[in-house]
Image (spheres, rainbow, N blue to C red):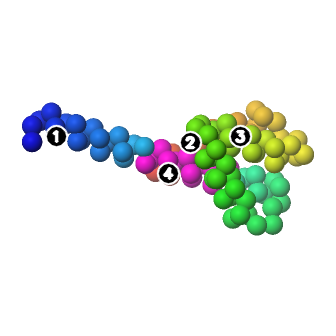
Amino acid sequence: MSSFDEREKSFEKKFAHDEELLFKISARKNKYLGEWASKILDHKDEKEYIQSVIKADFAEAGDEDVFRKLKEDLKNHNISDEEIRKKMDELNEKAKSDFK
């Protein structure tokens, strides 16, 4: 195997590893968001609600699908868009630190 092929394989492995890590961080962040919102909503089945937040992330790329779900679910609890986005950023950092 040439050094070019070895480098290519190495980059492919790193890319796959990085993508897997991003997926895990996103799922952990969504779990934390589900826990946070579930407490505000006083949801009876926290695990079910957390799963619904995690599943919401599969609607489209990025975080807007999760944001829309949280915004809709929390609309009667005086939680601003800014507060939701701030919590999303905060919990994303927490999720990142979980994997360091």
Q: Residue beneath label 1, please?
A: 6
Q: Residue beneath label 2, please?
A: 93
For discs 1 and 4, the disc positioned in front in the rendered view: 1
Q: Residue beneath label 3, please?
A: 67
Magenta portion: prevailing SS class: helix
Q: Residue 100: x percent and y percent? A: 43, 48
Callout 2 amino acid: Glu
Task: Specify start and end residues of the magenta stretch as a single range.
Answer: 20-33
First-in-chain label (4 vs 2) = 4
* Marks 1 & 4, CB-CB < 8 Å contact: no
Mark 4–mark 3 distance (CA, rounded to whole Å): 18 Å
Callout 1 amino acid: Glu
Residue lying furthest bottom: 45
Identified at 81% across, 44% down, the residue is 72
* Marks 2 & 1, CB-CB < 8 Å contact: no
Callout 3 amino acid: Phe
Mark 2–mark 1 distance (CA, rounded to whole Å): 34 Å
